[in-house]
Image: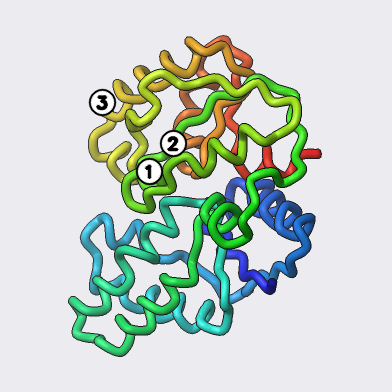
Amino acid sequence: MRVALFVTCLADAMFPQVGKATVALLERLGHEVVFPEAQTCCGQMHINTGYQRQAVKLVEHHMRTFEPYDAIVAPSGSCVGSVRHQHAMVAERAGKHQLAARAGEVAGRTYELSEFLVDVLGVTDVGARYPHRVTYHPTCHSLRLLRVGDRPLRLLRAVEGIDLVELPDAEQCCGFGGTFALKNADTSAAMLADKLRNVLSTSPDVVAAGDSSCLMHMGGGLSRLSVETRPVHLAEILAST
């Protein structure tokens, strides 16, 4: 299968290893991965902050960039959530009905990584080996918007050598929420403290998640503590051999 990588802004700018791991994983499974170089921000941060009119051009550009591909995969529940639940809405509100229809079609071919592996490719054992103690944080957008359910956990459970431990209150938000962490800094910090307390109670080597944004937030908190636990993206674990 020919797959377009929707790498996301955060991975492109700050976590390139996540994009590389996604490519390595999909190629190991026998698929051709294409990186459309014209891709830019999907517009999520504009939309969430109230700049929906300004986001229309980003939605238009996203359509032009990804329309030629039958499958579009991103290592981010957050960005896939925006494509699937916001793009058509933004276009409709701007009165661009044709664009909204195109956005709906592209959304139907856009997948978060664990969705693509489990639902489209039909695999849970991707041939990974990761001999570390891991706890998994299900990010809010993947859990609530995309409803990925236990797909990431099914993938992790099949990894050779992994010691996967259940995270207490796993569905509790880490406190990031994009601009929420800036607009409500004290609340965000308190939520992060609760999340890290639960993470560290499992004594993991690694806290995993499917969104670099949440891992960045938790990683910032972990870096201020005298602990060895580190944040690692789901794609990096699944690409390990």
Tag shown at residue 143: 1
Q: Is residue 191 above or below residue 241?
A: above
Q: Amino acid at mark 1?
A: Leu
User: Which residue is under mark 2?
Assistant: 138
Q: In the rendering, at what x and y percent does residue 108 appear?
A: 43, 71
Q: How far separated are the C-alphas under marks 2 and 1? A: 6 Å
Q: Quadrant of residue 95?
A: bottom left
Q: Quadrant of the N terminus?
A: bottom right
Q: How far separated are the C-alphas under marks 3 and 1? A: 24 Å
From this viewpoint, is residue 212 visible?
no
Q: Is residue 97 above or below residue 66?
A: below
User: Which residue lies at the image location 52% right of the left edge and 58% below the top edge?
Assistant: 8
Q: Residues within 10 Å of mark 1 (few under 14, many from 20)?
A: some
Instruction: Tell me which label, 3 or 1, sits earlier in the chain.
Output: 1
Q: Quadrant of residue 143?
A: top left
Tag shown at residue 124: none
User: Which residue lies at the image location 59% right of the left edge and 47% below the top edge?
Assistant: 14
Q: In the rendering, at what x and y percent does residue 215 appear?
A: 51, 35
Q: How far separated are the C-alphas under marks 3 and 2? A: 22 Å
Instruction: Tell me if label 3 and label 1 are in contact, CB under 8 Å.
Output: no
Tag shown at residue 186: 3
The answer to whether residue 160 is left or right of residue 230 is right
Instruction: Tell me if label 2 and label 1 are in contact, CB under 8 Å.
Output: yes
Mark 3 vs mark 1: in front: 1
The answer to whether residue 113 is left or right of residue 16 is left
Q: Amino acid at mark 2?
A: Pro
From this viewpoint, is residue 151 visible?
yes
Nearer to me, 190 or 83? 83
Which residue in the rendered view is the most extreme toward the front?
Answer: 122
Instruction: Tell me which label, 2 or 1, sits earlier in the chain.
Output: 2
